Image: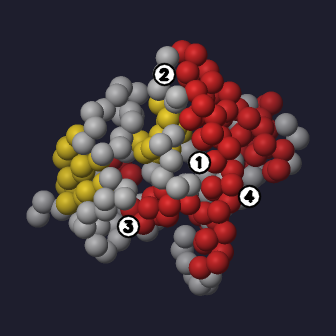
């Protein structure tokens, strides 16, 4: 819903009824409708967490050269909030959570962008994270997450579970930012490098 541009890459992965005529505005509206239906279907099946992606209108600026203004970045997070809050209203209504997979090309792709995404939507209960360790840099990282909803296999993870992670990825778009070892009580995430 937040991707910009919407193009042939999306046509290749979307259902024909979501793609429609390919007009970006229509694709986004139909995709949002499908996410709301997904929340209702999950509730009907007794599933409490749906894992997926949000997209990002500002991912194309991640290289930050030529420089991007803060107002453009802020507008991207506002776009995310404007598109996802109505969807999250339905998730709240039916008692299901959406677990965003922190991932390159998404609105939340590292620690700092995850904090910004959570701030943009007011830290809503319906919006949580799915941690896929392969998206981190290589090396050992100790993760303590107070808000994981499900694992990649879909099984429920315990709250405040601590585990060692070895990354399958050699790099990420932004890498691990300075100060990642500090605790963030607002995010509910504590990351430590054990060396």
- The disc, 1 or 2, on the residue closer to the chain's N-terminal end is 2
Q: Nearer the viewer, mark 3 or mark 1?
A: 1
**Badge 3 vs badge 2, beta-carbon distance below 8 Å:** no
In the depicted structure, whether residue 19 falls above or below residue 121? above
Mark in the foreground, 1 or 4? 1
Residue under numbered circle 2? 47
The tag earlier along the polypeptide, 3 or 1, is 1
Secondary structure beneath dot 1 equals loop
What separation in Å lies between label 1 and label 4 (alpha carbons)?
14 Å
Quadrant of residue 171 within the rendered picture: bottom left
Query: At 52% across and 55% down in the image, what residue appears?
Result: 122
- The residue shown at (63%, 24%) is 40
Task: Single out the residue that lies furthest toward the left.
Answer: 195
Instruction: Provide residue 181's location: percent of width, then percent of height.
Output: 23, 66
Question: Mark 4 and mark 1 in contact (Cβ < 8 Å)?
Answer: no
Percent x, y for residue 104?
49, 56
Front residue of 124 and 7:
124
Q: Where's residue 79, x and y in %?
A: 68, 60
The kind of secondary structure element at disc 2 is loop
Q: Which residue is mark 1?
A: 54
Residue that numbered label 4 is attached to: 5
Task: In the displayed orientation, state which residue is furthest to the top.
Answer: 45
> Marks 3/2: CA distance?
33 Å
Q: Is residue 8 above or below residue 67?
A: above
Q: Residue furthest right?
A: 21
Q: Is residue 137 left or right of residue 88?
A: left
Q: CA distance from mark 4 to mark 3?
A: 24 Å
Q: Which of pointers 3 and 2 indicates the residue nearer the eye?
A: 2
2 vs 4, front mark: 2
Label whose residue precedes the other's in the sequence (4 or 3)? 4
* Residue 175: mark: 3
Alpha-carbon span between mark 1 and mark 2: 19 Å
């Amino acid at each position: 819903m937040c991707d910009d541009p919407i193009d042939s890459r999306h046509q290749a992965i979307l259902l024909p009824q979501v793609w429609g005529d390919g007009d970006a505005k229509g694709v986004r509206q139909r995709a949002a409708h499908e996410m709301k239906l997904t929340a209702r279907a999950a509730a009907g099946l007794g599933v409490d967490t749906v894992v997926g992606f949000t997209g990002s209108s500002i991912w194309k600026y991640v290289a930050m050269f030529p420089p991007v203004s803060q107002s453009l970045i802020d507008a991207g997070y506002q776009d995310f909030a404007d598109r996802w809050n109505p969807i999250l209203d339905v998730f709240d209504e039916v008692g299901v959570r959406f677990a965003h997979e922190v991932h390159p090309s998404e609105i939340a792709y590292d620690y700092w962008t995850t904090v910004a995404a959570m701030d943009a939507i007011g830290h809503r209960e319906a919006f949580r994270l799915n941690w896929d360790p392969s998206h981190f840099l290589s090396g050992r990282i100790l993760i303590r997450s107070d808000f994981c909803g499900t694992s990649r296999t879909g099984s429920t993870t315990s709250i405040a579970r601590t585990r060692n992670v070895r990354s399958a990825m050699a790099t990420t778009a932004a890498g691990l930012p300075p100060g990642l070892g500090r605790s963030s009580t607002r995010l509910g995430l504590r990351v430590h490098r054990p060396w």
